[in-house]
Amino acid sequence: MSDDLYDLSGLATSLAATLRELLAEAGLVDAAVPPVELGMPARPEHGDLTTNAALVSAKRAGCPPRELAQTLGERWQAGPGAAVCERVEVAGPGFLNLFLGAAWYRGAVERMRAAGPDFGRGVLPEDDRLKLNVEFVSVNPTGPLHVGHARYASYGDALCRIFDFVGHDVTREFYVNDYGTQMLRFGQSLAARYGQRLGLDTPVPEEGYQGEYLLALADELIAEVGERYRAAIAAAAPDVTALAADALAAIKAWGRDAVLTQFRATLERLRVPFDVWAQESLLYAGDGEHRGFAGEVGKALADLDGEDLLYDEDGAVWLKTTLYGDDKDRVLIRSSGEPTYFLSDIAYHRDKMDRGFAHMIDIWGADHHGYVPRMKAAFTALPPHDPDRLELIIGQMVNLLESGEAKRMSKRKGDIVTVDDLLDAIGVDAARFLLVGRSHDTTLELDIDLAREQSNKNPVYYVQYAHARISSILRNLKGAGEGPAGGPAGAALPAVSVDDHERSLVRALARYPDVLLATAGQRAPHRLHAYLGELAAEFHVFYRHCRVLGDDPDTTRFRAALCAATRDALASGLSLLAVSAPEAM
């Protein structure tokens, strides 16, 4: 018998093969059999697993669902399922309930222990694996990252870790928006603060950045260059918007690089790495020129012109996005000759296609919701006109609660709670775990007081404590001379009976690969977050009812192996959310 029967995917595949045989016998040789889905019955008396496979296929088989379910169960139990299934029952309109034997549970634990921390790795079928580009966090380098960015960073990073674990080839990308109006205002604001630190009358422009963090940046600038720009700023004072272009460009570039250095340090602290830092400004540099623009921007304009998708009107250059579902055509080059952000974004996505990514995912903030139709239209307009290669995910806001009150944030006004503030307050583990605790498309309320609490009310503490408790149990077993938990990984376990609490924990563990697939497929790290809480709860119940180090060495060995498999799954899941798995608490 194949070892594949000892995981849920293998059981489902085996049942599907038997169902295919039955359909072939009914004359449906080439009938497509939907994947068999296995679920956990709501009540223990309904078996260990249940499937609606007969309900789904009864019509094409030309027989009543209950009859097909009965035939499927009997055929499978007499064949592939003989060694692992004690009996089958048909329930309701045609559900097939499976009652698995202790052999299946022991075999499942053996399989998990053999895989160790890699249990669930590579679960995605080879044909479904893609070369992915995931762009997330991407913000203007005009000030510190705030807690909203922390949510997108934690979500995007968790998604990338899970993609990689299940089998995708992932590139993580940060798009540096260092071109355009906001960067101009940032440069002017920094110049004003620099002038103020040198005793000049240089107020920050009304549309500029008012935050106190610019004073610290100005101090750093003075420490590095001294009074190099004093004369230029004094000549423009009090209006820094009149600052000479070369001085403004130099101050703006210095400020951008200083902020990006802060970004990197903050994101590293948050355990968020990036493979590529792509700069918007570089899209305008390079060979070739079209409509007055070089680099990737010029190439994108040439592509769109080649498709007859650009036209001139009122002195501006427009893209015919209405041909691809947008509500109106969009300007790419203003009548002033300046490019729009939209043109940069088109060129940037063209560049990502040129880099060979089969699928691109952008994770944007809630304020970008209205931007989705035009970006999809533009991507469709670009050769090879394949909109499915671009996936746009819109995240929602974070409400930070402390002592029951919400904190308001505005980067422009400087009234923000930074990522570093958050990490100082609750630590990295709590931040990473809680920030993916809800679906990305719902508002998240992050309770600082709960995050600090060292109790089972705190979700991250609850899961980490389960891992620490298991680690303590395994240390005690080793101290008692029991050797490796359950014996060497992959070794056969003794033929012990398996009680209800052990069965429940094994079934919870067996779900892990399917949870990973669902999490990756639905772009939903909160599903893994929820699963880890459920697994920890199952373990705590098992621990209350099943003594691991007991008088029977065979039972001890099996329970030790089950503990070790649970520890590995908890550690694996926590690592995919970039949360530590402590050995002691």
Image (cartoon, rainbow, N blue to C red):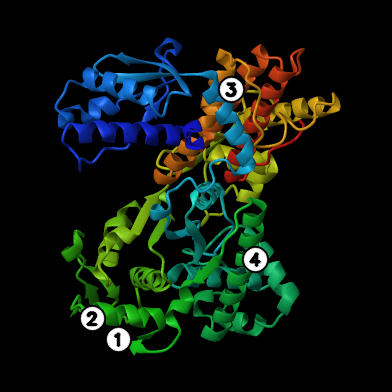
The dot on residue 174 is none
The dot on residue 305 is 2
Q: Secondary structure at mark 3?
A: helix
Q: Which residue is mark 1?
A: 291
Q: Are the two marked residues, 1 and 3, in contact with CB atoms closer than 8 angstroms? A: no
Q: Position of residue 530 (x, y in %)?
A: 51, 31
Circle 1 Cα neighbour tier, 10 Å, few/some/many (<14 / 14–19 / ≥20): some
The dot on residue 261 is 4
Q: Earlier in the sequence, mark 2 or mark 3?
A: 2
Q: Which residue is mark 3?
A: 537
Q: Position of residue 545 (x, y in %)?
A: 65, 12
Q: Position of residue 263 (x, y in %)?
A: 61, 60
Q: Are the two marked residues, 2 and 3, in contact with CB atoms closer than 8 angstroms? A: no
Instruction: Quote the CA–CA distance across marks 2 and 3.
Output: 60 Å
Instruction: Quote the CA–CA distance across marks 1 and 3.
Output: 62 Å
Please, what is the three-letter code of the amino acid marked with disc 4? Thr
- Asked if residue 335 can be seen in this view, the reply is no
